Amino acid sequence: MKKYASSRAVLLAVIAAGALALPGAASAGGSSDTVTISGRAYVFNHMSDYLEGATIRVRELPGLTATTDASGDYSLEVPDDANVTPYIDPPDGYNEIDLQTMHTRGEDIENANFQTPADFEYGLLAAILSVPIDDATGRPEQCVIVTTASARNVRGVDYETFHERTPHGVPGAVSSESPSIDGPIYFNENVIPDPSKTETSEDGGIVWSVVPAGTYRIETTSPDTRFASFLATCEDGRVVNANPPWGAYELSPGEEPLGASIVAASVARTEVKSGAAGRRVVVSVDSGEATRVNAVLRKNGKRVGHARVDIGVGTKKVKVPVRPSAGRGKATVSVKLRDAAGEKVTGDHAVTLPSA
């Protein structure tokens, strides 16, 4: 698996090609510790109809907003090395949609598009899928997750090319979840959810219609094609659409998933504690999903401590006991974070051990 160094330790160059600097975009401070998320908001099933004047927000960062222009385009600067779940607050007649949860890793996130259903399509899909609706809010009583098993040729292209290559689904794929939930239902070639289907059609659409609150790592597989996994963060009332070219996007042979797709977690800090029970290195991990933490402490090339722990959502502390034989001085704790799909990121963190 590809390794990504901690962006708090190393300032990576950001890829700005294609990003739009819109007058309505908010800034997270304009420093090199930020990246840009950009994309287009358009009407579900009507790719030539763009949404002007929609507000783009981030669940984890309520103070940040951007406004879509006449082409439906937006650009939003967000902190690097952070979990971000963008969502759209659309004009009247359309419905709020969340994207997948991403983790920024030193590169701009481009083509984070919003397929935004109008009231008619929203109501029709809810009826077809038997989604329980809260009468007071008009939103699902629980959560809905949608994605598309999408072809490689719609990733890394401009919107017009993306549109020309629609339908862009990969047939014959199936999805699973961690933790498991009921579903999914696959869309047929007429872009209609069809409970009789057991795999994707050329449309590629996949939906889970009744999902309890929680975080879900979604994996998609087929005999001939590899796909990236994604993280859906569900709360009651949300519709999470991890749509192309993100979500369940096709991987070329030998290609690794994009860094923003995997392991919604990072090391926040490390510190050394000493007491009657001995010395220990405490690794604080900020996590947006179920994550396995594997921390190995080395001094002068020798392994002098180890801890492997499964953690959940939130800031969790992993304690690495230090062997009594390890002397004082500089050491390195290597922290590997793994998501439920088996993707990994690794970072090294310098610490100084006190006397035993």
Image (cartoon, rainbow, N blue to C red):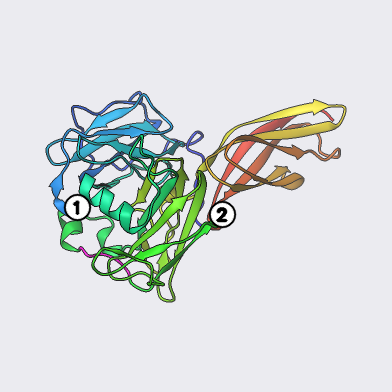
Residue at left offset 36%, top offset 51%: 242
The image quarter containing residue 68 is top left
Q: Which one is nearer the viewer's eye here, 184 or 138?
A: 138
Q: Can residue 118 be seen in this view?
A: no
In the image: residue 266, left or right of residue 164: right
- Residue of label 1: 158
Q: Is residue 169 magenta?
A: yes
The image quarter containing residue 348 is top right
In the picture, the disc for residue 179 is: 2
Dot 2 amino acid type: Pro
Label 1, label 2: how far apart the Cα atoms are = 35 Å
Residue 252 position within the rendered picture, expressed as x and y whole percent measured from the top left: 37, 66
As drawn, the residue found furthest toward the front would be 135
Identify the element where label 1 is drawn: loop
Badge 1 or badge 2: first in the primary sequence: 1
Residue at left offset 27%, top offset 47%: 113
The image quarter containing residue 65 is top left
Do labels 1 and 2 touch, CB within 8 Å?
Answer: no
Identify the element where label 2 is drawn: loop
Residue at left offset 84%, top offset 32%: 278
Q: Does the magenta stretch include residue 243?
A: no
Residue 34 position within the rendered picture, expressed as x and y whole percent measured from the top left: 37, 32
Q: What stretch is highlighted in magenta?
A: 166-170
Q: Is residue 31 visible?
A: yes
